Amino acid sequence: MSASTPNVLATQENPRQKFIIAYENRTNLWLSGLALVFLVTYSIQSIWPNLEQPWNSLLTWFSNALWVLFALDLLFRFLMTTQKRGFFKRNWLDTLTVVVPQLRALRGLRAFTKNGILSKGKGKGFFSNGALASAGLGTIIIVWVGALSVLDAERGAPNSDIENVGEAVWWMFETITTVGYGDFVPVTDTGRTIAVLIMFVGISLMGVISAGLAATLLKQNQPNPAKEVMDELADLKKMVSGLQEQIASQGNQAKPE
């Protein structure tokens, strides 16, 4: 094989990689919107498990169809990309929500990823920091999804304390902030597994929010260096203009009549 062969192959692969990048840029907004729709259907089925027919069957069919769509999207991107090594690691959220059925609702976090439907545009004030806004809104989604997941696992279990969405949300806030009053405790293996995951996620998210908020406050309280430099330059210009006027007036006075 000649030395120029790798360059030829790389040139041939470039169009595929360009295509998949364009595909992701065009579909990410729609898929993140569908992820929120999926979260709504999941929420309805979790809060009202005994929903009357045909609504229950319709929601189940719709959520399964969305899951198939997400799975096909992940498979298509994997087959088309020329950078298969580390693909599933780079797309860990999509992979996790496709492979683990219990975590499908976390797909809603796609709305806060790059080019997601809720990450478009620039915030103002405290939310001008993109990472801070994403962490805060992502925390809300995680609290909600975690509450519904634990509710599904604990509802009807022997000696369970979590039987409705209000108790599940309260337990989630206790867990994600690592407070843990102990008034509500999961008793099933699935519920306890979710609790452990939420504890790790809570520590990370609280750290991101605290650090982002502190950085934003420091940034707002610090003077603007660029403005200070411009003000000093303006003062120097005024000083130079004054000196030029004085020199000109002295020169006029020194001229003989």
Image (cartoon, grey):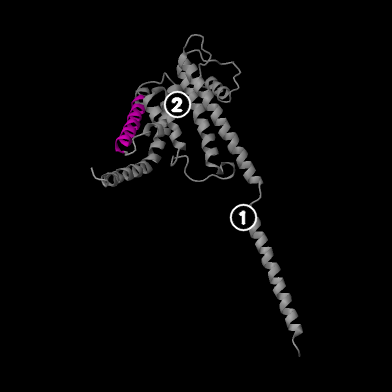
SS type, badge 2: helix
Residue 185 rendering spot, x and y as whole percentages: 54, 15
Eye-nearest disc, 2 or 1: 1
Query: Magenta residues, as a range?
Result: 60-80
Q: Residue at x 46, y 14 (%)?
A: 189
Can residue 62 be found in the magenta stretch?
yes
By secondary structure, the bulk of the magenta-drawn segment is best described as helix
Can residue 66 be found in the magenta stretch?
yes
For disc 2, the marked residue is 43
Q: Tags 2 and 1 in contact by the CB under 8 Å rule?
A: no
Name the one closer to the observer, 101 or 83. Answer: 83
Residue 235 rendering spot, x and y as whole percentages: 69, 63
Residue 155 visible in image: no
Q: Is residue 121 above or below residue 194?
A: below
Which label is found at residue 106? none
**As drawn, which residue projects farthest toward the left?**
1
Amino acid type at circle 2 is: Ser
Q: Residue at x 60, y 22 (%)?
A: 179
**As drawn, which residue projects farthest toward the top?**
158
Amino acid type at circle 1 is: Ala
Residue 69 falls in image quadrant: top left
Residue 63 rendering spot, x and y as whole percentages: 36, 27
Sort mark 1 into few (<14), some (14-19) or many (20+) by Cα contacts within 10 Å: few
SS type, badge 1: helix
Horizontally, residue 237 falls left or right of residue 159, namely: right
Residue 96 falls in image quadrant: top left
For disc 1, the marked residue is 226
Name the one closer to the observer, 107 or 199. Answer: 199
In the picture, the quarter occupied by the C terminus is bottom right
Horizontally, residue 147 falls left or right of residue 37, namely: right
Q: Is residue 14 above or below residue 88?
A: below
Q: Residue at x 50, y 28 (%)?
A: 142
